[in-house]
């Protein structure tokens, strides 16, 4: 007979070797809803606290290490992230991962994954719910401040990105995971029980994020991680500090060491190394179309190296439209166009960058548009009265201003608002509207990713032809909007424009999708349309296993018809 002390010792050993309390109930999640957006009016406590965080964060240069297996790693290969609105200010310096650190991160992630995937879903859900609460509460202003100073976001844009959208991704993914786990085979033959288990992918996930949305970086790493995967997260050079702080929030919430490896570095070299690894299981990418296509080709070339077929998930560029019908409410269409085109300096994949207006409405439309655009206040994010700030860096500034100069020199184009810019202090480009007589001019076709809108005026009788034009002008299919009060026109355009936009809006701007409300993503050259902010995305990081269990012995092998 075992003595009590021996039993206690054995139990303690069992506990420490990882034996867990079993799940003793089917749990019900707390209610999941969108994080309320704070308004930050002048004089409010929230504005004061946020601006204090901006001042505090901007008062020194921060240093961002790699985070590999939960440890801060320094390589000595250091780069800078500057404030795009005040380019002399170095917001942070950060370490770049080299081949040895990438190798270490991949190995560590595979080891961490073995425990992480075995952790019950409710533990993983609890961790990400906690991360959401930390981001919505204790760390909200610090992370927002880093997006404001590092990515040039004003208060509102930082709020809807680094606070509410990031929090919504974390919380809604938890809800979608719950729904996915509940989906089980509808039929069981007699004496049998069929089950589906939602395994994570075998191997590791490579998450590569863009500069423009902190929330997207969070989701690129957190969504696969929630489903039991381990992730190498390569942030954009333009968003290192905010992404690092968001990752620190997830670590504080309990994401175990090694599950998300935070590895800024040289995009090309790192990607080459990652894609050559046999355990590479998935690319989770958001960024430009040409980079995604290049990555897809690299993966295809390495296909014989991999253990499994890698899941390729990529949300990419857009050339989004507002189509105005003669029956539209002009003032509303103008206001939506100004917001859709120029919020966050047009640096949204969903930004409106081509506009189609009927001749009959154009005089009024143009007058209101130009007046509104010229009235836009622009400057550093430290002044909350600014509606617009800087673009992200010199390369973006040069690229965008080249488009403006192209239009200035094109005989079919006229710059009717804006057109001015300066990179003396920071990368400031005035919101610019180009009117063109050529609907296929360069600025109507190519993604500019800046505050440049091109308008084409069509004869009212050509509404149908214009619908065709909208669909045929670009290879993209991300977002679009129809403005009309005539229901027939709405229905007609909606049907005819079916494949031109993964997010289609009626009498609303083509930007500003909200997690839990408008799952986001486009098709054609705009991406794989796996809809971040929906259960669909989470499925991409799962490789389900079907289990069939038979309860009674099999007593023979012949068919009844053989008797
Ligand atoms: N569809 C969407 O949901 C969505 C959302 C946000 C941004 N975007 C798109 O992202 C782009 C803007 O973001 P960006 O400027 O950060 O994009 P980007 O393509 O320049 O960079 C995205 C990421 O890819 C990395 N990268 C760059 N070149 C690479 C290469 N050759 N190999 C491997 N990795 C590489 C970057 O370091 C960064 O981390 C726009 O095209 C925009 O439309 C799309
Ligand atoms: N949720 C965002 C996605 C923007 C992409 O950069 C929007 O719809 O504005």
Image (spheres, rainbow, N blue to C red):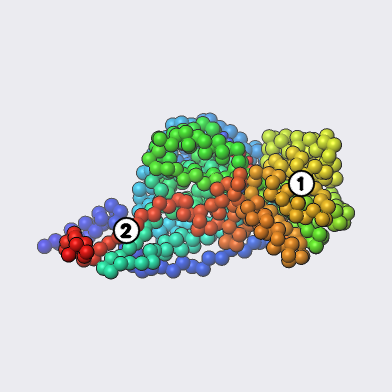
Q: Quadrant of the N terminus?
A: bottom left
Q: Mark 2 vs mark 1: which is more N-terminal? A: 1
Identify the element where label 2 is drawn: strand
Residue at 70% x, 60% y: name it.
492
Residue 529, can we see it? yes
How far separated are the C-alphas under marks 2 and 1? 54 Å
Could you tell me residue 7's position as x and y percent? 19, 60
Residue at 55% x, 45% y: name it.
314
Circles 2 and 1 in contact, beta carbons < 8 Å = no
Measured along the vertical axis of the image, is residue 106 above or below residue 147? above
Could you tell me residue 330's position as x and y percent? 82, 60
Q: For the residue carrying disc 1, how many other residues have a C-alpha within 10 Å: few (<14), some (14-19), or many (20+)?
A: many
Disc ID at residue 547 = 2
Ligand 1 within 8 Å of the CB at mark 1:
no
The residue at which mark 1 appears reads as 453
Q: Quadrant of the C terminus?
A: bottom left
- 137 displayed left or right of 353: left
Could you tell me residue 501's position as x and y percent? 64, 53
Residue 70, can we see it? no
Quadrant in the rendering for residue 426 = top right
Q: For the residue carrying disc 2, how many other residues have a C-alpha within 10 Å: few (<14), some (14-19), or many (20+)?
A: few
Viewer-side residue, 174 vs 255? 174
Viewer-side residue, 498 vs 264? 498
Identify the element where label 1 is drawn: strand
Measured along the vertical axis of the image, is residue 81 above or below residue 389? above
- 425 displayed left or right of 189: right
The residue mark sitting in front, 2 or 1, is 2
Could you tell me residue 488's position as x and y percent? 73, 65
Viewer-side residue, 1 vs 294? 294
Viewer-side residue, 439 vs 291? 439
């Amino acid at each position: 007979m075992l003595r009590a002390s021996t039993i206690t010792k054995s139990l303690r050993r069992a506990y420490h070797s990882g034996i867990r309390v079993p799940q003793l109930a089917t749990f019900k999640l707390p209610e999941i809803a969108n994080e309320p957006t704070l308004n930050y009016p002048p004089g409010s406590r929230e504005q004061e606290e946020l601006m204090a965080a901006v001042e505090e964060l901007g008062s020194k240069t921060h240093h961002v290490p790699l985070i590999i297996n939960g440890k801060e790693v320094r390589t000595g290969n250091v780069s800078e992230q500057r404030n795009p609105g005040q380019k002399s200010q170095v917001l942070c310096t950060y370490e770049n991962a080299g081949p040895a650190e990438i190798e270490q991160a991949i190995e560590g992630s595979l080891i961490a994954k073995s425990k992480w995937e075995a952790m019950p879903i409710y533990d993983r859900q609890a961790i990400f719910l906690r991360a959401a609460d930390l981001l919505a509460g204790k760390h909200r202003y610090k992370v927002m401040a880093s997006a404001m100073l590092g990515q040039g976001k004003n208060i509102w844009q930082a709020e809807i990105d680094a606070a509410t959208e990031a929090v919504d991704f974390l919380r809604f993914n938890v809800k979608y995971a719950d729904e996915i786990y509940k989906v089980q085979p509808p039929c069981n033959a007699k004496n049998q029980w069929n089950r589906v288990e939602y395994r994570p992918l075998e191997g590791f996930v490579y998450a590569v994020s863009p500069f423009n949305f902190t929330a997207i970086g969070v989701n690129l790493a957190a969504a696969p991680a929630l489903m039991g995967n381990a992730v190498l997260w390569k942030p954009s050079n333009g968003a290192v500090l905010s992404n690092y702080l968001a990752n620190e929030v997830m670590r504080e919430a309990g994401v175990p060491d090694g599950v998300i490896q935070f590895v800024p570095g040289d995009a090309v070299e790192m990607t080459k190394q990652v894609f050559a690894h046999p355990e590479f299981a998935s690319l989770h990418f958001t960024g430009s179309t040409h980079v995604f296509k290049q990555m897809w080709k690299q993966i295809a070339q390495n296909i014989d190296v991999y253990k499994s077929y890698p899941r390729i998930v990529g949300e990419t560029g857009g050339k989004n439209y507002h189509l105005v019908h003669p029956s539209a409410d002009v003032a509303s269409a103008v206001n939506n166009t100004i917001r859709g085109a120029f919020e966050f300096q047009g640096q949204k994949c969903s930004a409106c960058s081509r506009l189609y207006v009927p001749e009959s409405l154009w005089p009024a439309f143009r007058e209101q548009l130009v007046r509104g655009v010229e009235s836009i206040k622009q400057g550093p994010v430290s002044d909350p009265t600014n509606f617009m700030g800087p673009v992200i860096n010199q390369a973006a500034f040069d690229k965008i201003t080249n488009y403006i100069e192209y239009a200035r020199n094109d005989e079919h184009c006229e710059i009717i608002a804006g057109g001015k810019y300066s990179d003396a202090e920071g990368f400031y480009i005035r919101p610019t509207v180009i009117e063109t007589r050529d609907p296929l001019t360069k600025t109507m076709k190519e993604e500019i990713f800046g505050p440049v809108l091109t308008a084409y005026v069509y004869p009212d009788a050509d509404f149908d032809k214009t619908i065709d034009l909208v669909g045929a002008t670009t290879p993209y299919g991300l977002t679009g909007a129809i403005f009309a009060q005539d229901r027939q026109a709405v229905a007609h355009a909606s049907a005819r424009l079916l494949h031109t936009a993964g997010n289609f809006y009626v009498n609303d701007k083509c930007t500003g999708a909200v997690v839990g409300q408008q799952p986001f993503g486009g098709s054609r050259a705009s991406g794989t349309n796996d809809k971040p902010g929906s259960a669909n995305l989470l499925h991409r990081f799962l490789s389900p296993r079907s289990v069939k269990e038979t309860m009674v012995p099999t007593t023979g092998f012949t068919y009844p018809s053989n008797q």
